[in-house]
Every structure is written in C-alpha cells, then in structure tokens.
Image: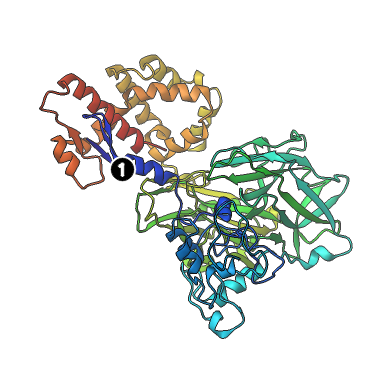
Amino acid sequence: MIRFNSIRLNICGATMSRSLLAAILCLLAKDGDGYGIYQNRIPNGDSVPSPCNPNVIWRGVGHLNAQGGGIRNKFGLDFAAAGHTWTRELCQKDSDEDGKTNGQELGDPDCTWTPNSLPPLDTGLSHPAVCEPIDSETCKSKAQEGGLYLKQEEWIADACKSGTFECPATNAADVERLTFQIPPTKVPNKVTSYMCQTFRVDDVSRDRHMIATRAIINNTNVMHHMVLFGCRDPNTPIFDVPYECGMSPGYSCGSILSVWTLGLDGECFYDLSGIRVGLNGLKVLAMQYHWNNPTQEDNYMDSSGMEMYFTPNLRDYDSGVAMFGQESILIPPYSTGTDVTGECTETCMNTMVKGQGINITYAFNHMHYLGVSQSVEQHRNGQFLRNITNDVVYNYDSPRTYQFEPPLEVLPGDRIVTKCHYKSPKRGITTFYGDETLDEMCYIFFTYYPFQNMPSPFCLAHDEWVYCDPATRKGCQQDDIGKFFTGFNNTELYQNITTRCEHFSPCITECKEAILTARASDPCLADPASWRILSNSLASSPDFNTFRAHLASCQVELYLEEHPTTSPATKSPSECENQATTKATCECDDSSGAVGNEANSLLAKFAVALICLVLLKG
C-alpha cells in the first residue's frame, strides 16, 4: 500500500480506494466558485436587480461579488446547503431576514416553480440576500458571513461603487479613444484557457500618453481576467484572430500596461504620468484573456476587450507596470495555514531602480482561491518602512485596489517583501504555483513613474532564488545558465551525460558517476532551486529535454541514496490499510503468495518511482 497525501493506491491488490476518487473530485472543486448555470436553477436567476440600481442585473445572486464567484452571501450559503436546488424549504426561507421569503423576492411566492419553466412572476423582484430597504438602520447593521464585511452597510457600499468607471481626465476635449475587442470566438470546453491577440496602435505618427483603460466584458460566465501588454518590437506579427497562449502573448510582448480582473472596472492613471505610445513609444499592443470554464460548456462565445484613452498632450512622466512576488508555491492538502514569501532584495533594487527612484501610484495584490490574506512591505536601511498593500482579508473575485496620493517613493536599495497566506481546508491535493485557476499565485502589480528609472519591472523569486541577485543563486550565475540556452548539445556537460547514460533505462555505474561529477562541477545542477527554474524555462527545448531524459535513468537511485531515511518500512496490507498517516510510509508485504516476490519487488520500485516523481516535481 502506498500512501501519499490523500491518495491511496493499492498496488498489491490492484484496487483503487475511494480516497483516490475523492482526490480527483477535489481537483475539480473550489469553495465559492461562480457558475452561470446556477442562474437556471432558481426562478428569475438571470433577472435579479441590483439594490444599488434596479436597471442593473446582479448576476452572481449567491455571491458578495455582483458578477459572481468568490465568497458566498447568505442566500448562496442556503442555496449550497440545499444542494444547489430550488427546494420548498429554500423557497420559504428568508435568507436576508427582511420579512420576505426567498420565493417572494424571486417571483415564486407559492413555491411552485420548477427548472425549465416560466416563473409565476417576473416583476417586483428583489435580491434574496440583501435586506431591504438598504438605507434602514436594521438592514445596514445586518451581520455578514465570510469575514470580508462585518455589516451589510459595508458590503452594499462597495457593491454600489462597482460597475461605474470614473476617471475625470477621460472627459477632456482632447482625449481620444481606441476600442479593441476580439471577434466573436468560441470558448474551448476546458476549465482554463489563455487566449491572446496582437493589434496596432491606431496612430504611430505622433506620441500620446495612455491615461486610462476600461474593460468591456462580453461573457461574464467565462471572463476571469485580461492583461494589456506592450510589444517593444514594432515588427511584432499582427493576428486577426486570437490564438492560444500562456501567461505571456510571446514575441516581444512582455511589458504589462494594464490589468483587469473580476471586481475591477478600469484603471485611471495618475495625473502626472501615462504610458507612451506612438512615434517614440509602443506601436503594437497585445491583449491576453483568461477564460475560466469550470463546467466545460461547449456553447460559450466571447468578444470581450478593452477601451483605451489617450491624450496628445504629454504628461510629465512615462509610467510603467511592475510585477513582484514569489513563483515557488506548495500548499499541502487540508492546510489550515501556509505562508509564502517573495523578496526583492536590496541588491535587486539597487540594480533595477535608477537615479532618484520611482513613485508608486496604484497597486493591487493577486492570488487565487486559496489566498486568505496578503501584504507587501517596504524596508529601507534594514528597517520596516510601511506596507504598500495590506489585504487582511483577500477576495480573489473582488480585489482591493490601492491608489496613492501623494505617490509612494521607492529608492534604490529598498527591499520589497511580498507575503501571501493560504488555507486549503477543503482541498485534498497539494496545490502548486501555476497558470490554472486551481493553481496558486503570489504577486503584487503596481503602476509607477518614471518608467525610465525602472525599465526592467519584474522581480520574481523562486524560493530564496531571485533572478536579479547573484548571491541568492547558490553559485548558478548568468554565465553558467547561458550554456543551457544556446548550443547546449555541443557542450562537454551534454556529451558526458548523453554518452554515459541511456534515457529512461536502468541506472548503470558509469551513468551515476557522470551525474555526480556533473553536479560537483556545475552549480546549476547541484542546487535544486536553480535546476527547477532551468527545467521550467527550457521545457520546450528538445536538447534540454533529451539531457533530462538521460539524467532520469539514475534519478530514483540517487534520490534514495541521498535520502536513506525515506525508505518505507514493511508492513502487512492490513496495517497499511488501517494506518492513519497521509505520508508515503508503507509498502506491501503479501505473505499470502497472491503476488510473487519478483512482481512485488517490481511494484515496490514502481511505487518508489512515483513518490520520487512527485517529490521532485518542479
């Protein structure tokens, strides 16, 4: 019996336990997700008016966020408790305690409605989770669930701000607009999709400053976030239709200009700065879309986009957008608290930040659904200076934004520390860093000026390893890394390993010795963090993957030699079955003869290999 976290695989009896099935189901579950299909499971689910404005639809009826997703409101909790089904009990309940039943608020006063039928009433509707009238003292003081708001008054005040984009500078007579939307595009029937499309700035004969952006959301069921990128190469290919991409559009499009995510309406830049486009600025832009389709519907279309505002009257400074954080994340199953920290060191900031420093005007934190709280600290001369951001309660679907007036000054040699706190009480598998919605992230995005004082605005850590600080690389320096990217198959390292090891074959002595010699002489192979980063960066390199395949032939043997205490103790199948631990501590001892010693040995080796692959995942 192998135990690894919540997954149990009975290789002796060749059976799959129910916990493996549970782990698969947990992979597909997130606490508090918003699903458009749930609108069809309650009467008038797609017509519930906002208490802020009766002409606006509150699409996420069961959530604090009007667009859906994230923390559930009182009605959402009751709906989930009813199995996401419109029951008589749910209909007769008064979730918001305002004297009207849920049925009365949703147009089913007699609780006769069934799915796929017309509701008895479609007028006089109200929100089943919002105590009304919202300006009464009784309703304003109603306690709220989820920890984000203590009283209904706080929740509704935030909700009524959402959906209205206010940026006075865009009303000036000289302001020009550029609207970009992708053509109507079919959304893939998979959970997560990243799509990108490049396009040209409409006028490159002169310089202008981009001063604001506003999201145009066509399909709220799938649109999770959009990122507007700048492409530094003016000859970047232009595509008429979107293409599947990753976290970046590729080509030269690596400059983040603006970010929209659930809960935001748009971005209004600081009045002394803007992003330069045109003759001496960006000429090609790219939009990246993150579609989240958890129910894998195959009939969704989307044509979302962004409206950009430009002024020909250049402001005092060019601005940029920075991304700092940590990209090595491991959150155990059922975690009651996991902390992750990413540090942009004094060395990095001395290298990155020029002249008199930069000024931060706007910022927001970014994690996914397991994120509970996040703060970003600024230190100077070894002393804590201030929190740039501090989300005591973080909500993925309704992020808090920070606008600074006056801007926050950041000097060369400051230290920026990003701290993320996660909990996974309902997730039975380990969660890693990644692009998928079910993965996790730990970033801060901030807008700053002048761009020229920090032209390379990325400071990303991998454990303690930071790209811009040689002291954190444990000997794996830029010169050492370079050989893996260009002409690697001609290096002595590549030849020594590929001629002495056979890919995915049994481990032989000369292969093991060649690997040990390589580790002793090459710091990038010796340091696990450096090797993991290289492996991720070169995942699409055929030569590097060939090299890794040859290394793999002795991977298990070397791991077991370096970690002798991890050898599993032999226990009987019944002892393994009854053992409460979630770690990989058992191997089968089938004394009944049902499985022969030779087969049992092979299965045990296979099990150890599985463990090692998981432990070495990176």
Mark 1: few, some, or many residues within 10 Å (few <14, many ≥20)? some
Question: Which quadrant of the figure has residue 561?
Answer: top left
**In the foreground, 349 or 194:** 194
Residue occupied by mark 1: 19
SS class, disc 1: helix
Task: State whether residue 570 appears in this view.
Answer: no
- Rendering coords of residue 202 (x, y %): 84, 45
Q: How many labels, in total?
A: 1
Residue located 20% across and 47% down the image: 580
Colour setup of the view: rainbow
Picture coordinates of residue 60 (x, y %)?
58, 59
Q: Amino acid at mark 1?
A: Ser
Q: Is residue 109 left or right of residue 603?
A: right
Q: Name the residue nearer the viewer: 557 or 51.
A: 51
Residue 133: image quadrant is bottom right
Residue 417 to residue 485: above or below = below
Left or right: 309, with 388 as reference point: right
